[in-house]
């Protein structure tokens, strides 16, 4: 069994690496799309919305409900892709760590 200092040093190193990885998530961008590309939402892997693009054809009062639905769908698509990108990056960081099954990071 490793001594306590080794375990504490390993935990600090893991925490430092995870902090770096989480900071990098704001640099990874994903795009959520709905309505066949009529509405596009760009977000970071941290979930920050960067850009919203709406096709001009949807800018009619009669299309208001559909536009609202498409924006919600694009946001959900972007959020799902952001979560997937975040999980992928965090998995890379923890791939070599001897963690018990099901253990979730960050602490």
Image (cartoon, grey):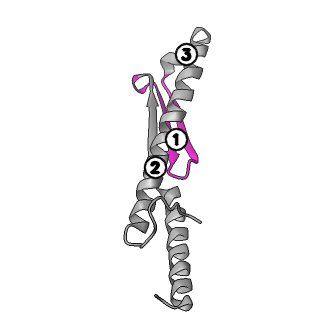
- Per the image, the residue denoted by label 1 is 79
**SS under mark 2:** strand
Q: Earlier in the sequence, mark 3 or mark 2?
A: 2
Observer-side mark, 3 or 1, equals 1
Query: Looking at the rendering, which quadrant does residue 93 occupy?
Result: bottom left
Q: Position of residue 104 (x, y in %)?
A: 52, 60
Main secondary structure of the magenta stretch: strand
**SS under mark 1:** helix
Q: Which residues are magenta?
A: 36-55
Q: Position of residue 40 (x, y in %)?
A: 47, 33
Choose between 85 and 37: the one closer to the eye. 85
Choose between 39 and 87: the one closer to the eye. 87
- Per the image, the residue denoted by label 2 is 29
Q: In the rendered view, would you say 75 is above or below 8?
A: above
Query: Looking at the rendering, which quadrant does residue 81 occupy?
Result: top left
For label 3, count other residues whose C-alpha is less than 10 Å away and answer few (under 14), some (14-19) or many (20+): few
């Amino acid at each position: 069994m490793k001594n306590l200092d080794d375990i504490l040093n390993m935990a600090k190193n893991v925490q430092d690496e995870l902090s770096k990885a989480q900071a990098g998530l704001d640099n990874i961008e994903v795009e959520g799309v709905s309505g066949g590309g009529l509405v596009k939402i760009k977000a970071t892997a941290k979930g920050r919305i960067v850009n919203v693009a709406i096709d001009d054809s949807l800018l009619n009062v009669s299309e208001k409900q559909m536009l609202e639905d498409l924006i919600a769908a694009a946001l959900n698509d972007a959020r799902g892709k952001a979560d997937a990108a975040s999980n992928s990056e965090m998995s890379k960081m923890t791939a070599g760590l001897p963690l018990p099954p099901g253990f979730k990071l960050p602490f």
